Image (cartoon, rainbow, N blue to C red):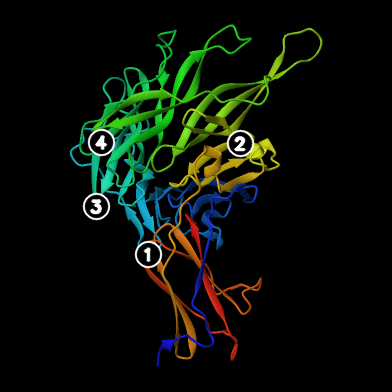
Amino acid sequence: MTTKASILLTAATVLLLSRASAVPVLTTLPIGSTIISVSGDGRTVLGSDSAGSFTWTQAGGRVALAVVSPVAISGDGTAFAGAVFNDGQYKAYRWTQAGGYQYIPGLAGINMPPLSLPPTASGMGISRDGSTVLGNFSTVQTDQMAFKWVAGTSTSLGDLSGGIINSNARVASADGTVIGGESWSSNGSEAFAVVGNGAIQALGNVGSAPPLPSISYSSSVRGISADGSTLVGFGNLFLALSGESQSVPRPVAVSWTKTGNTIGGITLLRPISYPSTTLASAGTQAAATNSDGTAIVGLVNTRTTINNGLGHDPTYTFATSAAIWSGISVHKRLSDALTAAGLTINEAIFRSSVGISDDADTIVGNGDFGPWIVTGARSLFGLSSLDVVLPKVSVLITGGSPVVTYDTLPGQSYQVQRSTTLGSDWVNLGAAFPATQAGTNAVTDTTAPAGEKAFYRVTVQAGS
């Protein structure tokens, strides 16, 4: 018989928590491993080490993947894309734990040069919903064609006019309808975008033409917002830093915006601001952005001026650092932002940032002391804390045990807890439940103290 818990149990209470804390939290993974990316929901990190590919989660730690060389992860962390050597050639694939390898079929009707080597394929990206795989097919080393794969069919994305046939698709919006990458054109290696089933669009570069005809410019799309409104990457500028007599090509972080079915509005992201005049930017690159393009991560190549004190010209050292951008006010090294937030930081930990969650609360990257993960990162971008929605909670006695049932929403994590005093003795009942869809979840308390009162609550953590 099932009855309302009325004597031994009180109605469940709800504690509101937010993952976006005042002080961000730093987690490091072992030296020798590398973080490749992070899922859009921020829960699953994709990495590799000497033992192979793996995923990492806060709850489960490192879990080995039975897949070779994945380079991209879906929004919920369940699907991966990459390339594997199979039957004498490299094949692009989509892989899931349940379905294993799903090899990407070749392009039909594409007039590629005569075969001198077996055709190969590279899977370079996957949409957040896991439906679209991106990459390139090639027949010889320098001739390749960008493709997208949807529902079992591969489609060519084309190639910009001029130069050799060489295009590569890297990133896609959540539903795969906006795609970015780079292609050779008459200008050199140039960023491109494709919207829906439309034609490939050249995205150009920033600044003036190269000073020498023998030098071509370079630009590329490396990240895209979930809604497809913002693409980020890099162009290059020919410029000389203070103390240099000759301009050289340097990468600069840029973004593009989508208006209707057109991608344009290339914008140079603001130069990195430094806490010391001995530091200067020698180039920046944007690698990824969140759901709506309001938070961007990447790296900056920092030049440090060293004065030898002997009246000679100063010497310089160069090192990359993870960088973040948001609006007009945030454009700094991640280490400087974390220091300002109250953390004691060794700058060498953060050499590059390679991924950001859609809610901008998780950033991942690599450094001199191994990979790193920063959670509670929204405040670094000047963004407000994440909102949570309080669930409906009920407690019933079923089969002699209390059962706590509560509503769930995607993007929130729930933890049922019990106390006998309403004091500091709250204990977790099982592991936290990360909801991926709206619904209900139930936890049975099989260890409830017999003959005593028990109080129950559900803590809610946004974006976990």
Secondary element at tag 1: loop
Q: Residue at x 31, y 40 (%)?
A: 119
Residue 217 position within the rendered picture, expressed as x and y whole percent measured from the top left: 41, 18
Structural distance between the alpha carbons of marks 4 and 3: 20 Å
Identity, as a three-letter code, of the amino acid under mark 1:
Ala
Task: Tell which of 20 and 48 is nearer to you.
Answer: 20
Structural distance between the alpha carbons of marks 1 and 3: 17 Å
Q: Residue at x 45, y 90 (%)?
A: 399
Identity, as a three-letter code, of the amino acid under mark 4:
Val
Is tag 1's residue or tag 2's residue first in the polypeptide sequence? 1
Would you call the spot at circle 4 few (<14 residues within 10 Å), some (14-19), or many (20 or more)? Answer: many
Residue 152: image tag: 3
Q: Do tag 2 and tag 3 residues touch (Cβ < 8 Å)? A: no
Q: Do tag 1 and tag 3 residues touch (Cβ < 8 Å)? A: no
Residue 98: image tag: 1
Residue bearing mark 4: 195
**Above-or-below relation of 246 to 105:** above
- Is residue 334 toward the left or the right of residue 140 in the image? right
Residue 302 position within the rendered picture, expressed as x and y whole percent measured from the top left: 61, 25
**Residue 126 in sight here:** yes
Residue 337: image tag: 2
